[in-house]
Amino acid sequence: MLRICHRPFLAMSEPCHISGCKHDVPAALVEQKLCILHFTLSLEASCAEMRRETALGNAAHERTREIMRFITEHGEKLARVATSGLHLTDDLKARVLSTFLTLMNLRENLDRASMRTPSGRGGNYR
């Protein structure tokens, strides 16, 4: 049985917390306090940083697990935003798809880096 939660007292939509941005924050991004555009830009910047961090295969196992959790959590959040029924412009749809691709590429980079790391080295810095 499908249960639908109704909220009788919905708060007014919150504006994005990026200075100068006048877009509203969708419900799925209230915790981040970002509109869809700024969420995707932030996510892409984080992915680029993690990609550089893991490019040489030196990331410790725990850090690799943290990055995998990041990919999963943010991918799920992005999917909820994209499929929530909000009207998205074609440009914003393209940005969301591009951000999904960025998350997928980061995951592939982790896999490739782990295959390059010789067994027993464990990604520890020397």
Image (cartoon, rainbow, N blue to C red):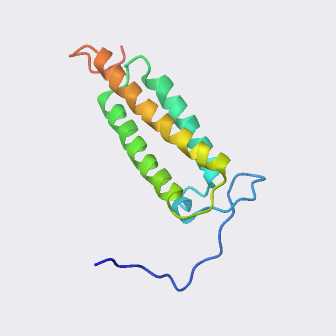
Indicate left or right for 113 with 88 as reference.
left
Residue located 37% across and 19% down the image: 57
Q: Residue furthest front?
A: 90
Indicate left or right for 97 with 55 as reference.
right
Q: Residue furthest left?
A: 120
Q: Nearer the viewer, residue 125 or 65?
A: 65
Residue located 65% across and 70% down the image: 13
Q: Residue furthest bottom?
A: 8
Q: Residue furthest right?
A: 20
Residue located 30% across and 29% down the image: 61
Question: Where does the image place residue 56, in percent across and percent down from the top left?
Answer: 41, 16
Say if 7 sits above or below 89 in the image: below
**Quick one: quadrant of the C terminus?**
top left
**Quick one: quadrant of the N terminus?**
bottom left
Question: Where does the image place residue 22, in percent across and percent down from the top left?
Answer: 75, 59
Q: Quadrant of residue 17?
A: bottom right
Question: Where does the image place residue 88, in percent across and percent down from the top left?
Answer: 63, 56
